[in-house]
Image (cartoon, helix red, strand yellow):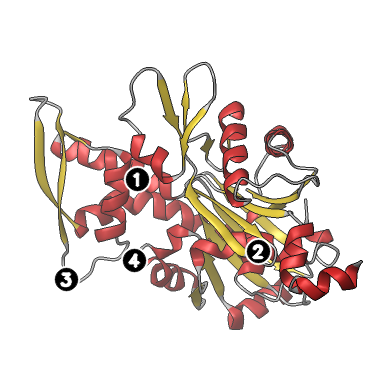
Amino acid sequence: MKKFFAKFIPARRFMGLISNDIAIDLGTANTLVYVPHRGIVLNEPSVVAVKVNTNVVLAAGKKAKEMLGKTPESIIASRPIRDGVIANYELTESMLRYFIAQANNNRRSLIRPRMVIGVPSGITQVERRAVEDSAKEAGAREVYTMMEPMAAAIGAGLPVHEPTGSMIVDIGGGTTEVAVITLKNPVFCRSIRVGGDEMDSAIVNYVKRKYNLLIGDRTAEQIKIQIGTVLVEEEIQRMEVKGRDLITGVPKTITLTSIEVNESLLETVASIVEIIRIALENTPPELSSDLVDSGITMAGGGSLLRGLDKLISRETGLPVHIAPEPLLAVVYGVGKVLENLDFFREALM
């Protein structure tokens, strides 16, 4: 029978037909889905829009994100993942079910999939159970969870299975994860609920405090991406920002500079640098000597903030590298674990 199928169906495609296992990076900002032999099949914002009192999904991902703050009372558009963990169980289940169907091209299978899901290292037992239950309700047969910094290190190509120290800093939307890893296990791991969302909130509060202007999170995110920096540069960048004047109540436009954005982000960045320092202080001496050569690897969307790698290098005295594809490091990591489950089993939670 196997020879019969092999004659008419290419081997990789045949494996894809009989295996529907998936790996998921369930992030605060974005959800990514990886399918063996197909790669990343879905990369969408972690936003879902549903009808009130029914949880019927009207939109998810990019379309739902466009609805944020613009829906009538009959529709709820929200981000069910906050600070890296589930804030709304039912909406998360609905979003996961929708994304899994999209990843499988709405194709039903007799075999329910196994799932490997990346979660923050600081997740509690209750929060972890919520993730597992949501995945099972969304159709999973078995659910494995693994720490996001471990997944990011694997996805970034670090030698986590060798007896040498590897340090990863994963700055996501809701959390910053710092870990020192050797022999497929963390010797130190810490998670703080500070990330890209915290940076956006800091920009919102700064503009509100200095200009009496109310802007939304999406506008703050655009400011961070376009002119955000943690080092004062010689060339000052500017950006027009539109919002609502808190005094007059009418729309208003101001010009924001990169120096002002830098000022707004100082406290958030200081928290990230401090947790890296704590990790280095708690690293065993032999592994510390490895880090002198290998340095620190950064992943996650927050690692792309201009000047952050240089600042961390200056503060720690270590070389700092940004992963080749920092936004995809976690999903590539959980994907590799799914494809080599026996080899990486001890890396799972």
Q: What residue type is disc 2 on? A: Gly
Coordinates of residue 225 in the picture (x, y in percent): 31, 58
Q: Earlier in the sequence, mark 4 or mark 2?
A: 4
Q: What residue type is disc 3 on? A: Glu
Coordinates of residue 283 in the picture (x, y in percent): 68, 66
User: Which disc, if any, is residue 306?
Assistant: 4
Question: CA separation, marks 4 and 3?
Answer: 13 Å
On screen, 280 above or below 269? below
Residue pointed to by mark 3: 235
Q: Earlier in the sequence, mark 3 or mark 2?
A: 3
Question: Left of 66 or right of it: where is 211?
Answer: left
Q: What residue type is disc 4 on? A: Arg
Q: Earlier in the sequence, mark 4 or mark 3?
A: 3
Q: Residue at x 34, y 66 (%)?
A: 306
Q: Earlier in the sequence, mark 1 or mark 4?
A: 1
Residue pointed to by mark 2: 333
Question: CA separation, marks 1 and 3?
Answer: 23 Å
Question: Left of 135 or right of it: where is 221?
Answer: left
Q: Residue at x 56, y 30 (%)?
A: 91
User: Residue 17 falls in which quadrant of the image?
Assistant: bottom right
